[in-house]
Image (cartoon, grey):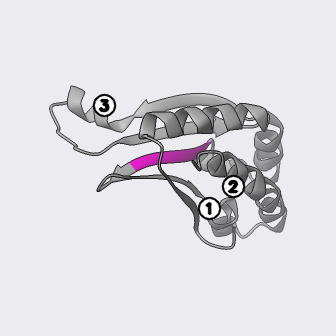
Amino acid sequence: MSQTFHNVETSLSAADAAKRVQEAALKEKFGVLDVMNLKQTMAGKGVVYDDEAIVISVCEPNFARRILTAESTAASCLPCRISVTTNKGKTTVSVPAPTSVFAMFNNPELLKLAAEAEPILARIVDAAKA
């Protein structure tokens, strides 16, 4: 991923795409820490949102340890978050590129780790292609 985000459009529903992302994360040895349905959360607060917005938090503990060892303040950027959204009937799965996220720290070791994780996260997102 040489861009800020890795995005994939899919013909799957948001729910099905989110399920595929979770399955792919587990295959890549990433744990699924949380699945937050923003539409439902907003509805619970009386806010209407017409499209779908699901955020899946994933983490691989060894990457997390190595990232935190290289830069403890990078904890605010963990875990990795993959979004599944709909807009005008299209479902998109997206993850911020770790190299873009961690570039702000200006830490070469952190960028090396981010570059290592980037293709794995891209494969997880790509699993939602239909």
> Residue 102 is drawn in which quadrant?
bottom right
Image vertical order of residue 85 relative to residue 96, above or below = above
Tell which tag, 3 or 1, sits nearer the viewer: 3
- Nearest the viewer among 92 and 100 is 92
The residue stretch that appears in magenta: 80-85
- Nearest the viewer among 78 and 30 is 30
Which quarter of the rendered picture does the N terminus lie within?
bottom right
> Residue 57 is drawn in which quadrant?
top right
Question: Which residue corresponds to the image point at 23% horizontal and 26% vertical from the top-left?
Answer: 44
Image vertical order of residue 42 relative to residue 81, above or below = above
In the picture of the structure, the residue carrying the numbered disc 2 is: 122
Tell which tag, 1 or 2, sits nearer the viewer: 2
Question: Sequence order check: which comes first, mark 3 or mark 1?
Answer: 3
Circle 3: element type: helix
- Nearest the viewer among 21 and 47 is 21
Looking at the rendered structure, the kind of residue marked 2 is Ala
Looking at the rendered structure, the kind of residue marked 1 is Val
How far apart in space, not on screen, are marks 3 and 1 (Cα)?
Answer: 26 Å
Circle 2: element type: helix
Image vertical order of residue 76 relative to residue 60, above or below = below
Q: Which mark is residue 101?
A: 1
Q: Residue 69: x percent and y percent?
A: 82, 46
Question: Sequence order check: which comes first, mark 3 or mark 2?
Answer: 3
Whether residue 82 is in magenta: the answer is yes
Q: Residue 31: x percent and y percent?
A: 70, 30
Question: Which residue corresponds to the image point at 77% horizontal and 66% vertical from the top-left?
Answer: 107
Q: Which mark is residue 41?
A: 3
Question: Which residue corresponds to the image point at 17% horizontal and 39% vertical from the top-left?
Answer: 48
